[in-house]
Image (cartoon, helix red, strand yellow):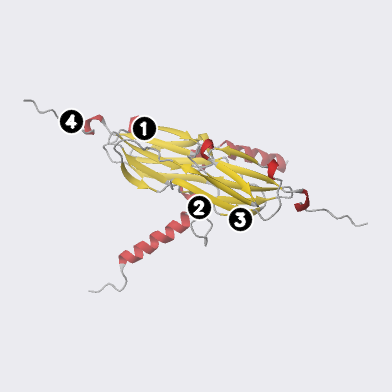
Amino acid sequence: MDNEVAKREKQEVRQASPEQLVDAGNAYLPDVDILDTKEALVMALDLPGVAKGDVSIEIDENNVLSIRGKTTFSEPEGIVYKEFNTGNYYRAFTLSDEFDKDKISAKLDNGVLQVTVPRREEVKPRKVQISA
Amino acid sequence: MYWTVNPWKELERMRRDMDVLFSRSPSGTREPSFPMINTYENKEDLLIVAELPGVPKEEVNITMENGVLTLSGARKPVVSAGEVETLRLERPQGRFEKKIRIPVKVNDSAVEATFNNGVLTIKLPKAEEARPKQITID
């Protein structure tokens, strides 16, 4: 009977979404590169062990962009040498008003999440032609 | 009025402590070179797990020579062309090479590697003579 309960709990935990499972308190801070292409900010986050579908990207009313990743890597038995701990990832960034919250796009490839945050049209640099 | 302690220094010290707290490396170890590896051992195999996010499979070279496993390759920047201003660069990039001495005899021809979500797992089956033997009491 107890066994049955344990089994069910385990399953529920596994099915939990990144939002339910990952918060700042139980996750690692992934390395990030942030590049400005004038059109947009391009962010790259290292999320090794995270599969497609196990990442959530949210932006709240205070322009806080939060990224959560749930790892699928399960550590084998018998550790003899360790350079990294495994676990989930969480990182948040505060964006300024010049970015378009509704047009954020992202792709996950080979353990790297690339997030593109475009500038709003009206703040993009524009070349002004000087008429004769 | 004097500052008995330098508040900026204190802040800096706090920041460093925080970094240690959130670092993925076990405390007390120095920041490992890219890629970070973990090693596991069971009766039959040695497992080398390396974190190589953003390195395409084709860019990873694994060689085994004289009991030394060499992992090499390159990681390219995400946006390379055009006018780009770098605001933050935390991810190591460029060429890398890491050598790991394998202390037991392994069956070189049966080494397998898998790559999933940026995590490389190399399985090195131990040679017959390196496996533990169960001795039965007569």
Residue situated in front as seen by the camera: A80 or B103: B103
In which quadrant of the rendered image does the N terminus of chain A lie?
A: top right
Mark sitting on residue A81: 3
The kind of residue tagged 2 is: Arg
Q: Are marks 1 and 3 in contact (CB under 8 Å)?
A: no
Indicate which label's residue lies in the foreground, 2 or 1: 2
Q: How packed is label 3: few (under 14 Cα within 10 Å), some, or many (20 or more)?
A: few
Dot 4 falls on a residue whose secondary structure is loop
Q: Earlier in the sequence, mark 1 or mark 3?
A: 3
Badge 4 and badge 2 in a common chain: no
| A6 relative position to A95: left or right | right
Mark 1 highlights which residue?
A: A104
Mark 4 highlights which residue?
A: A127
- Badge 4: chain ID: A
The kind of residue tagged 4 is: Lys
Where is residue A54 shown, x and y percent of the image?
Answer: 51, 36
Mark 2 highlights which residue?
A: B24
- Badge 1: chain ID: A
Dot 3 falls on a residue whose secondary structure is strand
Indicate which label's residue lies in the foreground, 4 or 1: 4
Q: CA distance from mark 3 to mark 2?
A: 14 Å
